Amino acid sequence: QVQLVESGGGSVQSGGSLRLSCVASGRTIYFYDMGWFRQAPGKEREFVSGIDWAGGRKYYTDSVKGRFTISRDNAKKTIDLKMNSLKPEDTAVYYCVARSSGSTYYSEVPSEYNYWGQGTQVTVSL
């Protein structure tokens, strides 16, 4: 079992920055692909970014490319999402996710992730 706990959410003005962190407890995350989803009010969950178990491959959805950076530290069992140039449309609850490493290092399908954090709110105002 892996437990995930996010932190770092908050309220910022458009153009600002936030860093989300996710700490895993329980089993090692060495062979887990991890990532971030987000869900805005009235919308479906959206896959934002993923990182493979070794940290060598990273995926970003088009709307955040060039603004968000994902990273991980397996020894500390953490992953981070650095978010720059935030926009009001980035407002959502952000969830840290993990799944056993597979043939693809990320999936945009929520049900393919075994473990979820409780979520952290990010609010971006004009």
Image (cartoon, rainbow, N blue to C red):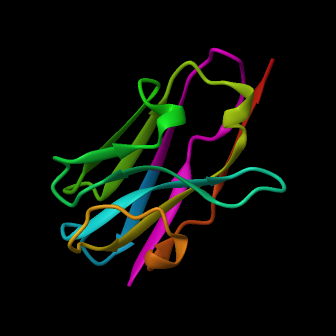
- Name the residue at 29% across, 59% down: 77
User: Residue 97: percent from the left, percent from the top?
Assistant: 46, 64
Q: Residue at x 50, y 69 (%)?
A: 109
- Residue pushed farthest front? 62
- In the image, 44 versus 114, the foreground residue is 44
* Above/below status of 103 relative to 72: below
Return the residue nearer the eye: 17 or 52. Answer: 52
Could you tell me which quadrant the C terminus lies in?
A: top right
Q: Residue at x 44, y 80 (%)?
A: 114
- Residue 10 vertical placement versus 94 (above, below): above
Which quadrant of the view contains residue 28?
Answer: bottom left
Tell me if 51 is positioned left or right of 114 in this view: left
Write the start and end of the magenta stretch as one range.
Answer: 1-21
In reply to whether residue 44 is colored magenta, the answer given is no
Examine the structure image and report whether residue 5 is included in the region drawn in magenta. Answer: yes
Task: Judge from the rendering whether residue 36 lies leftward or rightward of residue 59; answer left or right.
Answer: right
Q: Residue 51: horizontal and vertical position, in percent?
A: 30, 52
- Most extreme residue toward the bottom is 1
Residue 41: x and y in percent read 82, 52
| Above or below, 103 relative to 43 | below
Dividing the picture into quarters, in which one does residue 16 lie? top right
Residue 60: horizontal and vertical position, in percent? Answer: 41, 42
Q: Is residue 61 left or right of residue 125?
A: left
**Residue 34 appears left or right of 73:** right
